[in-house]
Image (cartoon, coloured by chain):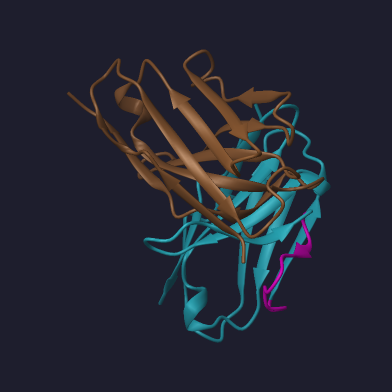
Amino acid sequence: EVQLVESGGGRVQPGGSLRLSCAASGFTFSSPWMHWVRQTPGKGLVWVAAIWSDGSSTMYADSVKGRFTISRDNAKNTLYLQMNSLRVEDTAVYYCVRDLTHWGAFDYWGQGTLVTVSS
Amino acid sequence: EVVLTQSPGTLSLSPGDGATLSCRASQRVSSVNLAWYQQKPGQAPRLLIYGSSNRATGIPDRFSGSASGTDFTLTISRLEPEDFAVYYCQQYGISSYSFGQGTKLEIK
């Protein structure tokens, strides 16, 4: 059974940093691309970042480029999101998501971890 | 960036009815890269349709998808009580992904 379990969310002040982790199991983690997607009540679902299967390439939404870094450790079956210079508007539930290869869709989602940026 | 506009915002129907949800793209989107998701309160989204018309694993055949130019449609025939939820379309373009704002399917 495919499982994606996020951790690392919490409350942080504006300008602060947080590192999210996603532990994957039930599939060959080194094969698919992986993503982070976030969701806020007001703005719905927003794609944040993607990383290729071997970690050699990454993509970011313009809103987080230069502040967030996606990475993966295929030996540990773990996906990461390092979030720096956090803003109030980064407040959201962050989902770890598996890519459905060749289709640009997301076939498995974690349960999400809440990040709250507030003073 | 491709903007996806979903309509209607809210759809009120009864179990047993058929539902038609629309998603319009602001520019050309490959039909290969259009997906639909269902989200229930307190849960993560679930993939329903990928490649505009392919059902994901375990999705019942009352869910179907189609494409015509920049217009994409999710059709649900014979609504079941568990189908009342929020539905999102999503596309993959050049180094970017985007979602529609969602359609809430509620019980009339």
Compared to A25, does A51 lie above or below? above
Q: Main secondary structure of the magenta part?
A: loop
Asked whether, in this view, residue A107 is left or right of residue B66, the answer is: left
Viewer can see residue B14: no
Compared to A64, does B97 lie above or below? below
- Is B93 or A10 nearer to us in this picture? A10
Q: Residue at x 52, y 47 (%)?
A: A23
User: In this view, which residue lies farthest toward the bottom?
Assistant: B16
Compared to A16, does B71 lie above or below? below
Compared to A82, does A24 lie above or below? below
Q: Position of residue B69 (x, y in %)?
A: 81, 45
Q: In the rendered picture, chain B carries what hue?
A: cyan
Q: Is residue B57 magenta?
A: yes
Q: Which residues fall within the magenta stretch? A: B52-62
Q: Which chain is brown?
A: A
- Is B89 or A119 nearer to us in this picture? A119
Quadrant of the image containing the C terminus of chain B: bottom left
Q: Position of residue A48 (x, y in %)?
A: 54, 32
